Image (cartoon, grey):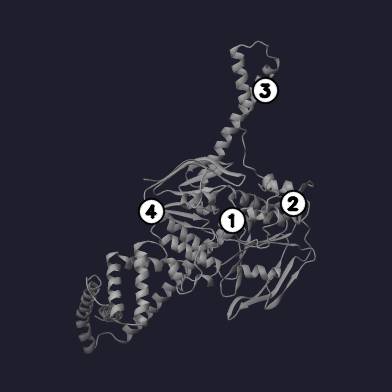
């Protein structure tokens, strides 16, 4: 079933054309990725589909009563709302029923009277009618998977990563047919990203997403839509298949272009020496020549080198000796020491909140240490690519900002580039050089920040989530630069593809203050961790089995047969179990009854909990007695 049909839409932002005559469809069950360089209009297109942006031409047809949900790059929320209120902010009838039920529970706890009891009965009946009990369990299971534990916290008290998780939970749990996701993996740790991959793979909902995570694209997406040079293209298959098709298209276009060039050489010679006669055939031939000359030239993807003549590192690069940091009673980093060597390329990994950014801030001196020393070599020059680029002045012109770091940069081959030339190599068009930074998209600001850092010619790069908000093309260029970079690299990132290409070793933060080293890249570590977790779990099972067998043998050795009292217990225990199971089944049927009051509900729930405990005790006792029968 077609959900959205788009015909020849065009959109500009000020004097900048984003795309022209874009046409595509979104069908039920598709999982589509939207790719293109920063500033090409990906987020704008999502907003257009949602109805939050106007178009200049074309038409958009949507399925009647199409339900959509939009996860923004920077989630919007009411700071006074609790986590639970934000999760239940949708118009889904089940969500509204759960929200009202939770409110009734709180009111009943504060003041129990006939009115609140009546409301509670009505709420529970509505929950039954909508099958909302299962939905509430799904909500809480999703929140548990995302490590959202305290539902009473207000949104304004949450970290950026936790806000993203809460917003993601709300989007996933909302009853929508089409889910629009703008950079859903930003600020998520690797475990959450892998969980989200599996969740999106299993869902039957239609998805249109913008993301730079190439492993994520490969695993989840069935189609790739691309905005390139103000034009729109669609490809079937995941990201790897898209790259293969793009490469084949370029080979075909290059062959066609070479053929046209060959024809033109002959035709242009004829044009210069043609007779003056005005025959119709000659006019037609001349017209064809001009058409070939005026054709749209093959535009290869702009790939640019970032190889700069880096400063030489001295004998001492950077030495950390016993550095530590705590916030209140929580230890983030305890007594960590390391001596950086020339050419070190180290990734920093760990769950959200484990202290990765704290470590970088301690090293750069932007955060005070509780103990320890950081000794930087005389020739070591840092460039710190932070998460938010917070020092960018929106009122400053793009070119003026770059020139703050210098007017020229020397490349590794000895040639120099001016500030304007370097900006163009980073896909900034001359028309935007004199625009204020505030007019750039989030990704363009990040790209500009990166240009300014490299222009300063550092020899020790410290990168905190550099892949957030950067497009895939810029990431590929940055990766190529870092591979050839002769200085040191210390990087925090959850982008597995990026980390696999860049780092040779890892600092692993366990969230309790300890930092361990691991020799290898991100995938190596994840594979090792899975094997280690599986081995630990296997060892635990084997230890329990050994303990059970040992206790079993000890008991049997001491006592070969049941006593008279134990025999009586064994003879009756099966009947006891059957009686408890029958009572449990009867009590569970109360939940589906048409009329019951809150008091009955509470008593029933309490008795069911008691029965669960009794049954577990009886079964354990039965297994024990069975050994001697």
- The 10 Å Cα crowd at callout 4, few under 14, some 14 to 19, many 20 or more, is some
Q: Nearer the viewer, residue 32 or 375?
A: 32
Provide residue 257's location: percent of width, then percent of height.
Answer: 61, 30
Of marks 2 and 4, the one in the foreground: 4
Q: Are marks 4 and 1 in contact (CB under 8 Å)?
A: no
Q: Which mark is drawn over residue 204?
A: 4
Q: Residue at x 61, y 71 (%)?
A: 515
Give the spatial CA distance, label 3 vs label 4.
56 Å
Which residue bears the numbered disc 2? Answer: 308
Question: Which numbered disc, 2 or 1, marks the residue that appears first in the sequence?
Answer: 2
Question: Which numbered disc, 2 or 4, marks the residue that appears first in the sequence?
Answer: 4
Provide residue 439's location: percent of width, then percent of height.
Answer: 63, 53
Picture layout, residue 557 above or below residue 87: below
Which residue bears the numbered disc 3? Answer: 265
Provide residue 493's location: percent of width, then percent of height.
Answer: 59, 61
Q: Are marks 2 and 4 in contact (CB under 8 Å)?
A: no
Q: Quadrant of residue 243?
A: top right
Which residue bears the numbered disc 1? Answer: 469
Q: Residue at x 21, y 77 (%)?
A: 583
Picture layout, residue 506 above or below residue 307: below
Quarter of the N terminus within the rendering:
top left
Could one spot residue 33 in this view of the protein?
A: yes
Give the spatial CA distance, label 4 vs label 1.
27 Å
Q: Is residue 190 left or right of residue 324?
A: left
Q: Nearer the viewer, residue 618 or 147?
A: 147
Q: Quadrant of residue 135?
A: bottom left
- The 10 Å Cα crowd at callout 1, few under 14, some 14 to 19, many 20 or more, is many
């Amino acid at each position: 079933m077609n959900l959205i049909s788009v015909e020849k839409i065009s959109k500009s932002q000020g004097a900048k054309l984003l795309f022209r005559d874009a046409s595509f469809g979104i069908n039920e069950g598709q999982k589509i990725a939207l790719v293109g360089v920063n500033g090409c209009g990906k987020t704008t297109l999502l907003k257009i589909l949602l109805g939050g942006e106007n178009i200049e031409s074309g038409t958009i047809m949507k399925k009647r009563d199409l339900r959509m949900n939009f996860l923004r790059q920077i989630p919007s929320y009411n700071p006074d709302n609790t986590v639970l209120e934000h999760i239940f902010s949708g118009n889904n009838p089940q969500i509204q029923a759960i929200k009202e039920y939770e409110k009734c529970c709180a009111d009943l706890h504060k003041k129990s009277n006939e009115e609140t009891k009546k409301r509670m009965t009505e709420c529970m009946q509505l929950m039954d009618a909508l099958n909302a009990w299962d939905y509430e369990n799904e909500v809480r299971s999703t929140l548990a998977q995302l490590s959202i534990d305290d539902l009473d916290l207000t949104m304004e008290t949450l970290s950026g990563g936790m806000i993203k998780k809460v917003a993601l939970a709300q989007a996933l749990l909302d009853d929508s047919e089409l889910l629009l996701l703008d950079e859903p993996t930003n600020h998520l740790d690797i475990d959450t990203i892998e969980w989200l991959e599996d969740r999106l793979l299993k869902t039957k909902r239609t998805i249109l997403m913008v993301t730079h995570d190439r492993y994520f694209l490969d695993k989840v997406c069935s189609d790739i839509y691309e905005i390139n040079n103000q034009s729109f293209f669609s490809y079937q298959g995941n990201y790897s298949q898209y790259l293969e098709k793009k490469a084949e298209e370029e080979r075909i276009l290059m062959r066609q272009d070479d053929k046209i060039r060959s024809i033109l050489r002959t035709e242009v010679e004829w044009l210069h020496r043609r007779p003056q006669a005005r025959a119709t055939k000659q006019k037609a031939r001349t017209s064809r020549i001009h058409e070939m000359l005026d054709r749209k030239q093959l535009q290869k993807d702009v790939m640019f080198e970032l190889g700069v003549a880096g400063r030489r590192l001295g004998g001492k690069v950077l030495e950390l000796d016993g550095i530590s940091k705590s916030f209140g009673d929580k230890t983030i980093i305890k007594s960590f020491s390391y001596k950086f060597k020339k050419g070190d390329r180290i990734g920093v990994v760990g769950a959200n909140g484990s202290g990765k950014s704290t470590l970088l801030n301690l090293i750069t001196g932007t955060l005070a240490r509780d103990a320890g020393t950081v000794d930087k070599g005389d020739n070591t020059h840092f460039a710190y690519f932070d998460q938010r680029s917070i020092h960018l002045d929106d009122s400053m012109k793009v070119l003026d900002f770059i020139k703050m770091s210098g007017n020229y940069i020397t490349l590794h081959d000895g040639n120099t580039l001016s500030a304007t030339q370097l900006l163009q190599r980073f896909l900034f068009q001359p028309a935007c050089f004199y625009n204020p930074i505030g007019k750039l998209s989030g990704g363009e600001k990040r790209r500009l920040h990166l240009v300014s850092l490299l222009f300063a010619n550092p020899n020790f790069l410290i990168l905190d989530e550099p892949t957030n908000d950067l497009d895939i093309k810029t990431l590929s260029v940055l990766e190529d630069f870092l591979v050839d970079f002769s200085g040191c690299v210390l990087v925090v990132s959850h982008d597995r593809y990026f980390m696999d290409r860049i780092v040779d070793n890892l600092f692993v933060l366990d969230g309790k203050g300890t930092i361990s080293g691991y020799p290898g890249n991100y995938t190596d570590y994840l594979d090792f961790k899975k094997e280690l977790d599986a081995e630990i779990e296997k060892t635990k099972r084997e230890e329990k089995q050994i303990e059970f067998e040992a206790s079993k043998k000890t008991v049997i050795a001491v006592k070969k047969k049941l006593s008279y009292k134990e025999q009586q217990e064994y003879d009756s225990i099966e009947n006891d179990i059957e009686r408890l199971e029958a009572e449990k089944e009867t009590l569970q049927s109360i939940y589906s009854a048409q009329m019951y009051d809150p008091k009955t509900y509470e008593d029933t729930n309490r008795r069911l909990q008691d029965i669960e405990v009794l049954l577990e005790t009886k079964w354990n006792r039965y297994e024990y007695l069975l050994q001697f029968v």
